[in-house]
Image (cartoon, grey):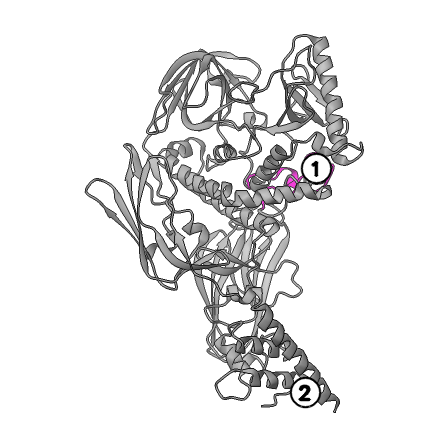
Amino acid sequence: MKTLLKLKQLTCILLSAMFIFMIAGPMAEAELITAETMTLEPIKADGVTITPIEMDVLADIEYGIITFRETKLLSITTSFDEGYNYKSTHSTFFPNNSDRTSISDNADGSKTFVFTAVTGETVTADDFNSVGIYASAAQLPKLEINIGIPFSQVTKETWVDAEFTLTMGTKKFSSGDYSGTGSIKGRGNTSWDQPKKPYSIKLSEKKSLLDIPKTKKYAIVPGYADQSLMRNFITYKAGLMFDGIEYTPKCEFVEVYLNGVYNGIYILVERVEIEGSKIDIEEAGPEDLTGGYLIEKDIDGKIDYDADQWFNCPYWANQSQDFFVLKTPESDDSALLEQMLAYLEAHMQKVHDSIMGTSGESYTDYVDVDSWIDFILMQEITKNIDGNLKTSCYMYKQSGDDHIYMTAIWDFDLAYGIANWDNASYQHNDYYDCPNGMGTSDFMAINSSSPWFDHLYDDYPEFSEALIAKYNEYRETLIPAMRAMMNEQAAYLSENTARNDNKWGTEFASGVNTLQNWFDGRIYWLDRQWCDDYEEIDLNYAMNAENGSLQFQTEGEQYPFVGVSVDGRLAGRSDISGINDAESAVELTIDMQAGETLTFEYKVSSEQGFDYFEFYVNGSQTLRESGSINWTTYTFTAPTDASYTFRWSYIKDYSVDSGSDCVWIDNVAYSGDPQSNYELGDVNMDGNVTAADALLVIRYAMGLTDLTETQLALADLNGNGTVNTEDASLVLRAALTGGNQA
């Protein structure tokens, strides 16, 4: 009688659930995808003219994967300016589907690219929205610098007279060629100690070089540690898209010759200063100590105590280590300079107290929210180890305005996963420590030693909400543009990088690949933290072969695999990128008969010889890989009838990341009958027959969800070949009685 009563009670619950579903409609995970017309809009690139021909196709989109609903040709025709050559390596016309892409040469020298969208086939939304045809430049602009002494004698302290000659390359600039005089000296701190050195340039008069607005002061920056040569360039170009930061330095690539000797590829960039075309504010003077000022945050070891106009950060954790440098105005009047520094020190104390909530004043009275958000976001996107208010961080204050404005994002050659100073471990109040700089996970600026950024984010919901909203906006504009720039500039430079590689022992192509993989991993991590519409992808759905129903176990794993969109497919991905001394793993247990197989595909992007993908069968390692490995198939054949536990693992050592720092697993398929591993009625295949299985059958009967073939077989308790509410009732009875009642 008690069992019958329970059955009636649960039946009522199920009927109530049915009523709710009928009223409320499908649950979020069961929503049908509505087809929409996807419009291909190719990215415009230097040296390439694109003429769209036919660009629309009907498709569905889910989890960032586009599935075509019709077979259709998508085509674009391109022509190339003189001196530009098509670069297939970096062009993105659905590269993951190259077997369905054709290229034809036309009589007028143009090329037509045709992609066949096949019904049921997929591409990633990122691929679809980043189609671009890119070209290499036969010649880069050439900057020749000649001085009367060997360049080995140039120092950072003394200006040396110089002659400059700038000659246009393939890319044309309205400013044209240039020849003139001026002076040069070394620049930088740690970068000055590297073989490929940076320099400051001062022209005799203001001139526009490579269409950079007229100025006397330029720099040539090598980015020696950056084998892609692009980190600073891409960041500065992206900064021009900011809403909140009004000024970002302009730059262009040049080949540099020093006293007639080739020295490699640099970027020519304008130096940061108060000037009409740069930071357009009036300089402070004796009549007005309130502004304007250009200030740089810096640290001990980078301060010239005899020459720099500096003041301490007495409120910072390390009073003897942290400084602000007054870059502008410079004053020979020691009394006036002392007044300026005293005013700024007192004002920055007010900024600090307002942020920390100790003064009773609002941080909004001192912090320009828009520029600070832009600044923080760029540090987070690039994971810039110098951008956490440690060094090379510029800000300004205007006359009569208490707000501090962030400006001139600068120095990103060690960002994007290159550097990891002092292991960059997370520890507040240690000026040199910050979250792992090389990994794609963890917040950089927000969790850094700076007491400002983390307090603004943690203590003021309106600030963090505004920051997240801005990230979501930039996710649709700025970030795709940065991805496109990586391809465009890699193509643009490619015909001229061999000389640079030979000169400095670098590998441009490898550097580009590492940069792109790291960036994709970083955005994936940030999306999970901040994207309003981020969808967690079911791991079982992602790892199974099509229509597969294997159930993967992650319980007990500190770092389980996660479902992701990659390369036009869904897959499982290890989730410890940037986390040292860690393991990410997922398991599967199957009862197999001798001769049956388990097959899967894997892709690896890791530090060669140190961070490994490992595959185990019943605790025995059968596969171990590292480095860069594209999709590869592996098959295990059961030697005997037995239960087999499979474990996919990515193991990271104590330091250093490379590539995306992960493994992807996809298309896991068992050759036998998966149903044999589950009890009849266990429709959700979790190892138990419960009311949840009955509810799943009801939802299927109502058309609210789909079931795999294996699930349908497990749900058909009466064995009539049809799954309906009668089967749901039998599943429920089995759940209550502990046995099938068919």
Number of residues whose C-alpha sits closer than 10 Å to that of mark 1, classed few (under 14), some (14–19) or many (20 or more): many
| Residue pointed to by mark 1 | 449
Note whether residue 272 is visible: yes
Residue 278 percent across, percent down from the top left: 53, 22
Which stretch did the figure color magenta?
Answer: 417-439
- In space, the residues marked 2 and 1 are separated at their CA atoms by 59 Å
Q: Nearer the viewer, residue 66 or 545?
A: 66
Query: Which element type, helix, strand or loop, lies under badge 2?
Result: helix
Outermost residue on the top side: it is: 333
Residue 583: which quarter of the image?
Answer: bottom right
Callout 2 amino acid: Thr
Asked if the stretch drawn in magenta spans residue 138, the answer is no
Of badges 2 and 1, nearer the viewer stands: 2
Q: How many marks?
A: 2
| Residue pointed to by mark 2 | 737
Q: Are marks 2 and 1 in contact (CB under 8 Å)?
A: no
Residue 118 percent across, percent down from the top left: 34, 61
Q: Earlier in the sequence, mark 2 or mark 1?
A: 1
Q: Nearer the viewer, residue 654 or 570?
A: 570
Asked if the stretch drawn in magenta spans residue 434, the answer is yes
Quadrant placement of the N terminus: bottom right
Note whether residue 317 is visible: no
Is 315 positioned to the left or the right of 286 in the image?
Answer: right
Callout 1 amino acid: Ser
* Main SS class of the magenta portion in the image: loop
Outermost residue on the bottom side: it is: 1
